[in-house]
């Protein structure tokens, strides 16, 4: 039963990706083929453009999120800040409330600022959402850095900036890479924020998947879902390499 729950939906998705005709009462597709793969990757139909848009927005969200999370994570991990735990909990607020009312209000505010229906607006939404993962992981990464090596470098005459970039950052790089992968995958799969802030001017692959599902085009929806699934599985294997046990133990401390 557990195997059926875990692999049943994925198996059904894989079958739909190579299905041309499938209807009741047939247990398996009536005809098989790759016609819809050609349809998805045909530039005229916009699926490939939506994929490139999703990747571009995800990369931009990773850059902005990491630039914000590194100094914030370092300050929270290595400096004695007042209300430290309260500040860290603030970054969890986007996950503490239902997404629908939050994004509806963000869309209203962005419309007044002229950001609704723009790439910048979508990137900002994905960045705020990504900070939830990025800050907590990077705080844990900086917390497990060895302070003795930093003191040794300072005693040898290195400036604070040089110590940070040559000693501290390399030690925390595994956590920074892991957080970047989490943000990339979260942005790549993000639907609700992209729908309320970006649609219809900014079309990402999850929006295309949603439209195809609503139209009953399960082949296109399944192929789009598979395209989103493959990088998630591959990147999770990479994250497992960088998320060391001693760093995971520091998350939330």
Image (cartoon, grey):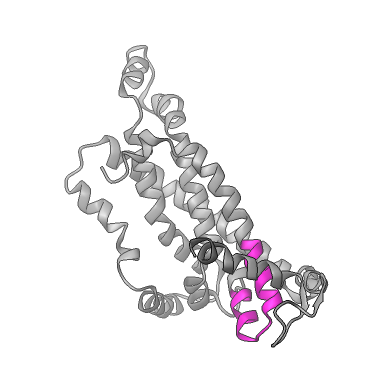
* Magenta span includes 107: no
Q: Indicate left or right for 185 with 29 as reference.
A: left
Instruction: Give the main secondary structure of the magenta stretch.
Output: helix
Residue drawn at point x = 52 percent, y = 62 percent: 6
Residue 44 sits in quarter: bottom right
| Residue 118 versus residue 72 in the image, above or below | below
Question: x, y (%) of residue 46?
Answer: 73, 73
Q: Indicate left or right for 193 with 26 as reference.
A: left
* Closer to us: 112 or 172: 172
Number of labels in the image equals 0
* Residue 115 visible in the displayed image: no
Rendered-image quadrant of the C terminus: top left
* Residue 113 visible in the displayed image: yes
Q: What span is colored magenta in the figure?
A: 207-228
Question: x, y (%) of residue 146?
Answer: 34, 24
* Closer to us: 188 or 238: 238
Question: x, y (%) of residue 186?
Answer: 50, 59
| Residue 137 versus residue 95 in the image, above or below | above
Residue drawn at point x = 46 percent, y = 47 percent: 179
* Magenta span includes 212: yes
Q: Indicate left or right for 10 with 245 as reference.
A: right
Residue drawn at point x = 46 percent, y = 29 percent: 170
């Amino acid at each position: 039963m557990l195997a059926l729950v875990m692999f049943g939906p994925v198996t059904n998705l894989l079958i739909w990706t190579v299905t041309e005709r499938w209807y009741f009462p047939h247990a398996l597709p009536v005809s098989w083929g790759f016609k819809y793969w050609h349809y998805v990757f045909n530039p005229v139909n916009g699926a490939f453009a939506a994929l490139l848009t999703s990747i571009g927005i995800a990369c931009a969200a990773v850059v902005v999120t990491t630039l914000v999370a590194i100094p914030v994570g370092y300050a929270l991990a290595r400096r004695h800040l007042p209300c430290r735990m309260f500040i860290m909990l603030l970054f969890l607020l986007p996950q503490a409330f239902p997404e629908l009312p939050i994004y509806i209000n963000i869309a209203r505010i962005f419309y007044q600022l002229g950001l609704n229906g723009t790439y910048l607006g979508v990137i900002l939404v994905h960045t705020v959402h990504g900070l939830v993962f990025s800050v907590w992981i990077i705080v844990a990464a900086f917390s497990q850095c060895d302070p003795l090596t930093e003191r040794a470098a300072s005693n040898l005459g290195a400036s604070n900036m040089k110590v940070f970039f040559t000693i501290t950052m390399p030690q925390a790089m595994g956590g920074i890479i892991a957080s970047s992968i989490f943000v990339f995958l979260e942005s790549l799969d993000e639907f609700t924020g992209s729908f309320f802030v970006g649609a219809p001017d900014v079309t990402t692959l999850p929006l295309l998947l949603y439209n195809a599902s609503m139209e009953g085009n399960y082949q296109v929806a399944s192929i789009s879902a598979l395209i989103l699934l493959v990088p998630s599985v591959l990147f999770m294997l990479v994250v497992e390499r960088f998320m060391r046990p001693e760093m995971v133990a520091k998350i939330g401390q």
